[in-house]
Amino acid sequence: MIQSVLEWQPDDAGTLSSLGSVLLMLNRVKEAEETLQRALELEPRSGHARLALARIAGRRRDEQKQLALLHEVIEVDPGTSGPAAYNAIGRLLLKKRELEPAIEAFQAALAIDHMNAGAYDGLASVYLEEGRLDEATAYLVTSLRFRPAQPQTLTTLAQVLRDQGELGPATELCERALAMSPKLATAYNTLGRIYRKQGDGERARAMYQKAM
């Protein structure tokens, strides 16, 4: 449909930016990059196009370029695209175990959009790294309140509950996650560990096999 629109609006920056994102999801990276660059030429303050270009830089492991693009997003489009940019920065910092700056980035996202589930997920990840399970649980629950259909967040919360010995609720969360995403390997692995804790080796093995 986007391609059809482009035939009528070949110089529409928003449409080009959306097309670039679709091409990126299809792993047509070179075409995506060219399309997004064209969108930026038409609309230099496009935060959406810069976010997609930052994702391309991330795929290429060009962290310097990725961070530069993310900071540009915050500068030119803080209200709409800023939270996603702050979340991406937070994830990069978390990966390097720079936990306090990561917290600041996720909190900056929430200062713009207090219902941003990605930021709550990010904060939960930081606190899990620090072993602060109560805080992590609170942020995961908040994330799910704002965006319930998150299979990976459901699974992460299940893992926390499993480690706290709450096997029944953890099992229910994994089943909810798999109802939304039947191929989610982490959910099967988590169920396998739950069944193993319960002494049910046969069901545990079945879950591990499904995770493969």
Image (tube, grey):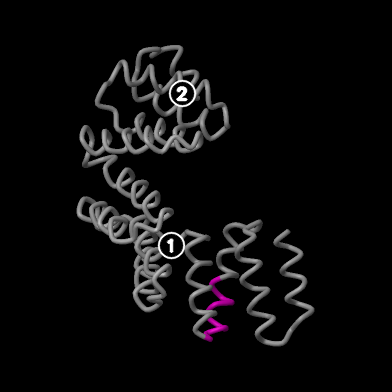
What main secondary structure does the magenta stretch of the protein show?
helix
Which disc is residue 148 wearing? Answer: 1
Category of crowding for the residue at label 1, using alpha-carbon neighbours closer than 10 angstroms: few (below 14), some (14–19), many (at least 20):
few
The residue tagged 2 is 33
Check disc 2 and report its element: helix, strand or loop. Answer: helix
Q: Nearer the viewer, mark 1 or mark 2?
A: 2
Looking at the rendered image, the quarter that the C terminus falls into is bottom right
* Residue 63 at x, y percent in the picture: 41, 38
Q: Which amino acid, by three-letter code, is at mark 1? A: Pro
In this picture, residue 193 sits left or right of residue 172: right
SS at mark 1 in the image: loop
Q: Which span of residues is magenta-colored?
A: 165-173
Up the image or down, 101 lies above or below 129; here it is: above
Question: What residue is at 52 percent from the left and 28 percent from the top?
Answer: 23
Q: Is residue 11 magenta?
A: no
Residue 100 in picture, x, y percent from top left: 28, 61
Q: Is residue 108 left or right of residue 198?
A: left
Q: Position of residue 77 (x, y in %)?
A: 23, 35
Q: Give how far apart the Cα atoms at labels 1 and 2 are.
A: 32 Å
Judging depth in this view, the residue of 116 and 212 nearest the camera is: 212
Q: From this view, report whether residue 31 is shown above or below residue 194.
A: above
